[in-house]
Image: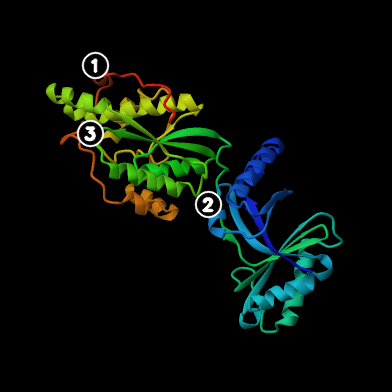
Amino acid sequence: MPESDLWLVRYGEIFLKSDYVRRRWENVLVRNIQTVLPGCRVRSERGRIWVQGPVDPGRLRRVFGIVSFSPVTRCTTDDLEESLLALARERDAGGLRTFAIRMRRVGSHPFTSQEKAVELGNLVRRAFPGLRVDLDDPDLELHVEIRGDACYLYTDVVPGAGGLPPGVEGTLVALVSGGIDSPVAAWMMMKRGCRILPVYVALEGFLGKDARGRAEEVVEVLRGYQPDIRLRVIPDSYLACAKVQLSRDWVERYTCLLCKRRMYRIAAAVAREEGAKGIVTGESLGQVASQTLDNLLVLDDAAELPVYRPLIGLDKEEITRVARAIGTFEPSTGAVEGCRAVPKKPSTSADLGKIREIEEGLDCPADIPLPLKE
């Protein structure tokens, strides 16, 4: 008898890796699926992953590494024809005009994939005389996978998140403000196989609790893509100390750069503590004063680790489209009070030597207190 409650999961890039890497990354993907679907049984088999049990498609769509998935009916070669016709009737084939058989075969059989596709296509046409074959744009696609004596039938192909399983490339620290850009940047590096440790630097005296709440909300959305994610909140009084001296010395225009350099140093300290391989930021070239080429050079000087900027070549409209698609746009645009430290005319082309000179002259504790773990 046909078996239901079975889902076929497909991956893409993983298949192109060496056998050792493919097996290791496939195992990571299986574990990630098991994490989001704890009530299901997950197993892999020759380029396919099978999930048995009550699947929540919404959760499965957020698992990086999955290209697509389908609910399938499992049967044997003996009852393939009966099961295929039952599936066609379930999809109301009699009320449609065109169909196609999409055939895939694994293993040794006394027929080719094309021969079996023609045979099954003729079977469907006899059962539904009004249907005709259209391989380019059919109203109904009947997918058949034959693996040994087992057959898997399905009609729906649900797109997945794609990319690589989080963690296979290592860990990165993401500076997350809660605005539109930084959550998207973190998400994009997740998609490339990175586990993300989000950090929110609470600038004492300049940011309200609503800003922290917004950051917590967007990280909660990202939890759908990385279940173990947790926002690290690090209070910091450096800017409160520096702001007074910057105003006194008429160099207030450098406030944002000095603040971001401090955030880079905090992120680097967290990265060293956690064994992370770099920092992720939501900077996009030319979007604001601190994100010009000159100022990005000044910021990189403070990082001590690689800084990854996946949004660097995107404009605000492109970033917003991604934010809407992944679900972070709404919490990111919640009403919050802006940073009260931003100067009226921030510098757009700072000199690195000048910035270092200002930092050295500040009477503020510059060391990052360790450990930073809560």
Front residue of 80/17: it is 80
Q: Secondary structure at mark 2?
A: loop
Residue identifier under label 1: 357
Side of 206 where 4 appears, left or right: right
- Specify the quadrant of the image occupied by residue 306: top left
Mark carried by residue 184: none
- The disc labelled 1 sits on which kind of residue? Glu
Mark in front: 3 vs 2: 3
Residue 341 picture location, percent across and down: 20, 34
User: Is there CB contact under 8 Å for labels 3 and 2?
Assistant: no
Quadrant in the picture for residue 236: top left
Q: Which of the pair 160/104 is nearer the observer? A: 160
Q: Is residue 248 left or right of residue 8?
A: left
Q: Secondary structure at mark 3?
A: loop
Asked if 224 appears above or below 240 in the picture, the reply is below
Asked where in the image residue 259 lies, by quadrant, the reply is top left
Distance between the alpha carbons at the discs numbered 2 and 1: 47 Å
Residue at image coords 84%, 68%: 78
Front residue of 206/312: it is 206
Left or right: residue 83 compared with residue 188 = right
Mark identifier at residue 62: 2
Q: Residues within 10 Å of mark 2 (few under 14, many from 20)?
A: many
Question: How far across and down, in percent of the image, does residue 258 sit?
Answer: 27, 26
- Name the residue that disc number 3 marks: 205
Mark 2 or 1 closer to N-term?
A: 2
Name which of mark 1 and mark 3 comes first in the sequence.
3
From the viewer's side, name the closer residue of 133 and 4: 4
Contact between labelled residues 1 and 2, with CB atoms less than 8 Å apart: no
Residue type beneath disc 3: Gly
